[in-house]
Amino acid sequence: MKSLIQFFEENVEKYASNIYLWEKLQDKYEGTTYQETRRQVHEFGAGLMQLGIKKGDRVSILADGRNSWVIGELGILYTGGINVPLSVKLNPEEIRFRLVHSGSKMVITSSSQAPKILEVIDRCPGLEKVIFMDPREEYSEKQIHFNEVRKIGREWLENPSNRKSFEEFTASITPSDFANICYTSGTTADPKGIILTHGNYVTNVYQSYSLMDIPQFYKTLLILPWDHSFAHTAGIYAFMGKGASIASVKVGKTPMETLRNIPICMKEIKPNLLMSVPALAKNFRKNIEKGIKEKGRLTEALFNFALKMAYSYNKEGYNKGQGLQKIKKPLLRFFDRIMFGKVREAFGGELEFFIGGGALLDIELQRFFYAIGVPMFQGYGLSEASPIISSNSSKKHKLGSSGYLVSNMDLKICDDDGNEVPVGQKGEIVIRGGNVMHGYWRNETATNDAIRDGWLYTGDMGYMSNDGFLYVLGRFKSLLIADDGEKFSPEGIEEAISEQSKFIDQCMLYNNQKPYTVALIVPNQHALKLYLEDRNMSATTEEGKRTVLNLIENEVNEYRINGRFGHMFPHRWLPVALGVLNESFNEENGMMNSTMKIVRGKITERYTDLIEWLYTPMGKIVYNERNMEEVEKMKLG
């Protein structure tokens, strides 16, 4: 095995003149070659050394994705230091915890994130310097610009003896040296710092190549947060190892402006592969459907007809076009030419597929993207595994599964007592391999709980199929537990309800050894308002409020026997009582984390009284007083 330094140097030698980084600072994208990237990395790394960074020191990065992000991380690694990548969605107190807990000596930041650092810097005693990626009018003694660090390094490296000692030192960095401390979102307790070594990353990159190839000409637009281990391994390093290129989204003056830049950047970069998470996938689909709807009812009806036909033809992907389904192929080619092909142009026109990670992708979402010709292949992993464990791919896939396993990794499914269960039986997913983290930073108890005899206990429930596909069912911590002890993962039901109903935005199921399951529902207020307006009704009246609640209840009832989706889930786990909420689950109120997953513990704590009340006779009636009051609070007219 090799260090990330050796991995990078070898690939620069192989692909020196290839473009590695694409960045749009003004009106168009400019490319930076592998060779030029290395020059800047050497300068920045040498500059950090001259500023006092030594082997084992921690340096944090809090910034939007850009060239300086990659150059910053690699520069830190060349000093023997450890990068602590931080999410731009963190608030100042969450940042302070991570800076102090990791013992970061320096932090590299962008102009949009700098105010958060400056707010807490006086309470971070170990922080010696702030490195700004963007220019400032003035710098205090503890502040310096990114390019000034490079200048210090460049001037030092001009001396041949300094250059020699720099190269000798970087060659001494080993695969077992720490590369990153990646913090968990800390949804149930203080965040844990996941220690990933150079060898963890390099191992996982080579493991991922067993799932799919990345040709040299491939480009990706890294729309995921760059601190995310998925973006790290599958983007920054996997593309590096094949001489391919990565592009950053043009940074806007606000997060919303950066988000709006994504479709523009996509058309300019024309990515061949995109990495996504369910929240982004849903937005892509909503925008596609909105664009189709705006073209009129005939186009919308034709699009929906084409989708339905594609779904029946494609099935689960591996079994598409079989038997009598073959007769649909010519018509589907026609629909692809007049409709689906034009939809794909929004992604640049050269996109071959998505890889979906971060959370479970709703099967309906997978079928949608497969139908329009840009499959979204579900993968599975977690940061503690560097993070890739399995994925579907163009050459081998089965919609609804989390794909097949990476090479050179062992996986077993264990029962509650830690015993391995036969293929097809559910249990905890447990893995062993060179991609398993070193442990948690300054948390021996959590490390010993997660890694036992070299095996990583993921905390996720799943099973292996006879044909070698992994099915991930959800987190053990989020399981529904009936009063008879039977367990069930709620994520599939929650995703289906919120994805397939235009009147429901979010849903959380709850059952902790109770006689039945209940649900907290966040409606789509815009869709409800339009529904009432079409019928000349108002939510200020008793009739209007009852209509809204009846509509929501009917959407959930579609999953019961005789409903449109009555075949999808065991009926005993469908919610019997519904608590309707005016306030959504979001990052601001702490009920959604930075990876867009709901934080069950906080939601349950916030709505304890409501959940208990849903287990009363009155709570089971959807028109109950509390639900009527919540509807009245909504702006439905």
Image (cartoon, rainbow, N blue to C red):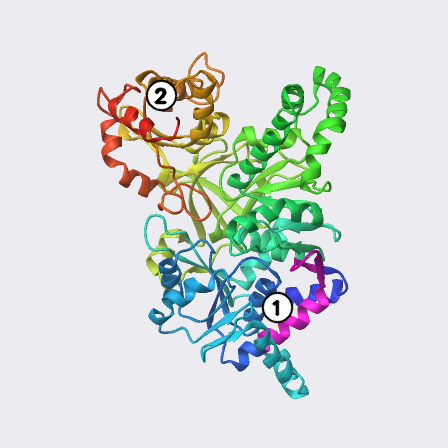
Q: Where is residue 452 drawn, in percent x and y?
A: 40, 53
Asked if residue 183 can be seen in this view, the reply is yes
Specify whether 116 is left or right of 291.
left
**Part of the protein shown in magenta:** 20-46
Quadrant in the rendering for residue 15: bottom right
- Which kind of residue does numbered mark 1 sit on? Ile
The one of 81 and 337 positioned closer to us in this rendering: 337
Q: How much space separates mark 1 and mark 2, taking CA atoms?
A: 59 Å
How dense is the environment of label 2, judged by Cα within 10 Å: few (below 14), some, or many (20 and up)?
many
Q: Which residue, given by chain and number where applicable, does mark 1 sit on?
A: 5
- Which kind of residue does numbered mark 2 sit on? Leu
Q: Between disc 1 and disc 2, whose residue precedes? A: 1
Quadrant in the rendering for residue 161: bottom right
The one of 99 and 323 positioned closer to us in this rendering: 99
Q: Which residue, given by chain and number where applicable, does mark 2 sit on?
A: 549
Q: Is residue 544 above or below residue 180?
A: above
Specify whether 134 is left or right of 429.
right
Q: Is residue 208 above or below residue 37?
A: above
The structure residue drawn at horizontal position 58% and vertical position 74%, both measured from the top left corner, is 45
Q: Where is residue 473 drawn, in percent x and y?
A: 46, 35
Q: Quadrant of the N terminus?
A: bottom right
Q: Quadrant of the C terminus?
A: top left
Q: Where is residue 293 drawn, in percent x and y?
A: 61, 26
Helix, strand or loop at mark 1:
helix
